[in-house]
Amino acid sequence: MTDSSFFSSALELRLPDPHPLHERLVEDAARRGLLDVAYCTADTPVGSLLLAATEQGLVKVAFDRQDHDAVLAELAAAISPRILRARSRLEPVLRQLDEYFGGERHTFDVPLDFRLARGFRRAVLDHLPAIAYGHTESYAQVAAAAGSPKAVRAVGTACALNPLPVVVPCHRVVRSDGSYGQYAGGEEAKRVLLTMEAA
Amino acid sequence: MIVKPFEQIVAEHGPMVLRVCRAVLGPADAEDAWSETFLAALKAYPELPSDANVQAWLVTIAHRKAIDVTRAQARRPVPVGEVPDRPGRTEAWNGDLWDALARLPDKQRLAVAYHYVAGLPYREIAEITGGTADAARRAAADGVKALRACYPLEGAHS
């Protein structure tokens, strides 16, 4: 045994999860304005959701198939690498997601940070909450509502790239023939959400 | 370029920094030093060059924070009859080894902590503690020798 391996085994220390030191770091960071992005995951009927929030509000919701680690790396590059796993900032949206998947909530009421969507994509997202729970609109209808009736494809892109799926209901936008169409969470997730809302 | 979220830095290096803080300061002050180290690191992280050695960077910060903690202690009156906190056996911390480390002269303890616990080369250690790489190597060797004399480093060789 080398001295190095002796020391690392004799001084073995693991950080249990959640570790009080990690909690303290999160609290200190938030108090000093250094927690640029807080994130956690939630188990839902559409799989594990990654939830990330800036000081302004919820900034990203991502499905498992989008690869949470890759999404966090994107957030580090696009927003700030000062990212910590911190549930407290996400508590309100976690509670509301629970209520939503329990069928008790039809709209979300948490601060949203739309910095990851700009221009026309942002205009589309602004319209989506107007599609009521249990209802759907076609891509063409949304294009018209967002002020560009011809931009049907661009609406599809805006929905596919929606940084806040589920909370900003892009799943309520479907094909004119009534079929579900594509979804960031996969077509099955879209079916689960629309079936639940139709019940 | 891929930027690692800071959470990943904490997960990858947090246990190592805690071991270093314990080796340098002892268990009672290690947690304060760890917290101060990672808070300072979080603040400076966006400016860290992408090719930086994260381990050496963190140990450098921890070294400074440990000095702060030691200075603050020196200003505090020493409580009479107080026994330093020691974690229980369940925490997998070997109290005897800590005692032995605590008895080493500062230079030796730092060299042992930064080389054997943090895994830094002597050149990096010299940059953190001052002095030369050779001096750091000698201090670490003397430290390990002293530890061997009072603590059974079973099967260890340098």
Image (cartoon, coloured by chain):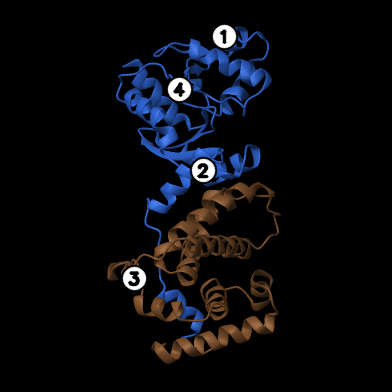
User: Which label lies toward us, 4 or 2?
Assistant: 2
**SS at badge 3:** loop
**In this structure image, what is the colour of chain B?**
brown
B28 lies left or right of A80: left
User: Which label lies toward us, 1 or 2?
Assistant: 2
Task: Give the position of the C terminus of chain A as an image quadrant.
Answer: top left
Residue A181, disc: none
B81 lies left or right of A21: left
Amino acid type indicated by mark 3 = Ala
Q: Residue at x 28, y 68 (%)?
A: B90
Q: Is residue A191 above or below residue B63?
A: above
**SS at badge 1:** helix
Quarter of the image for residue B101 reads bottom left
**In this structure image, what is the colour of chain A?**
blue
Q: Position of residue B83 (x, y in %)?
A: 32, 69
Q: Check chain identity for marks 1 and 3: say if they share one.
A: no
Q: Are marks 3 and 2 in contact (CB under 8 Å)?
A: no
Q: Residues within 10 Å of mark 1 (few under 14, many from 20)?
A: some
Residue A110, disc: 4
Q: Check chain identity for marks 4 and 2: say if they share one.
A: yes
Look at the image and tell me whether residue A85 can be seen: no
Amino acid type indicated by mark 1 = Gln
Q: Are marks 4 and 3 in contact (CB under 8 Å)?
A: no
User: Which label lies toward us, 3 or 2?
Assistant: 2
Q: Are marks 1 and 2 in contact (CB under 8 Å)?
A: no
Q: Residue at x 50, y 18 (%)?
A: A174
